[in-house]
Image (cartoon, rainbow, N blue to C red):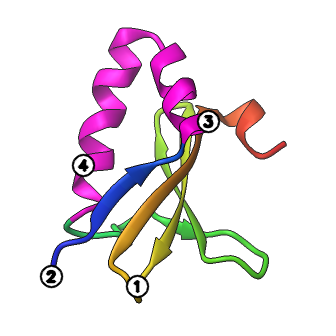
Amino acid sequence: MSYTVQIEHKARRQLAALPDQMRARIEPRLEALAEDPRPRGAIKLRGGQNIYRIRVGQYRVLYEVRDDVLVVLIVEVGHRRDVYR
């Protein structure tokens, strides 16, 4: 059972603005979410939404898992000092 990974417009712009080296590290992790939307190390954030985060070095990827339609929606990508604001 494979999920579809979708990236919101805001997250797509944030990903494009990253240095090439960091983007090359993050993109495979995003693709891997299709097979396992809750990988080891993923943490569910507090709040009413179904938002998780994964770490890639100093960067964080925030995403929502929609189990009913098998979709992983990437919400935000950024440096850890900025992503939670």
The residue that label 3 is drawn on is: 10
What amino acid type is highlighted by mark number 1? Asp
Residue at figure coordinates x 28%, y 63% from the top left: 4
Q: Which residues are magenta?
A: 9-34
Residue 56 is situated, as x and y percent measured from the top left of the image, at: 44, 39
Q: Amino acid at mark 4?
A: Glu
Q: Which residue is mark 1?
A: 67
Residue 14 in picture, x, y percent from top left: 57, 26
Crowding at dot 2, Cα within 10 Å, few <14 / some 14-19 / many 20+, comes out as few
CB atoms at circles 3 and 4 under 8 Å apart?
no
Residue holding disc 4: 31
Q: Is residue 36 above or below residue 19?
A: below
Q: Circle 2 sits on which residue?
A: 1
Q: How many marks?
A: 4
User: Could you say which is closer to the camera, residue 21 or residue 9?
Assistant: 9
Mark in the foreground, 4 or 1: 1
Under mark 2, the amino acid is: Met
Which quarter of the rendered picture does the N terminus lie within? bottom left
The answer to which of marks 1 and 3 sits earlier in the sequence is 3
Q: Residues within 10 Å of mark 3 (few under 14, many from 20)?
A: few
Q: Which structural element holds mark 4?
A: helix
Residue at the extreme bottom of the image, as rendered? 68
CA distance separating discs 4 and 1: 17 Å
In the rendered image of this protein, does residue 83 appear above or below residue 4?
Answer: above
Helix, strand or loop under label 2: loop
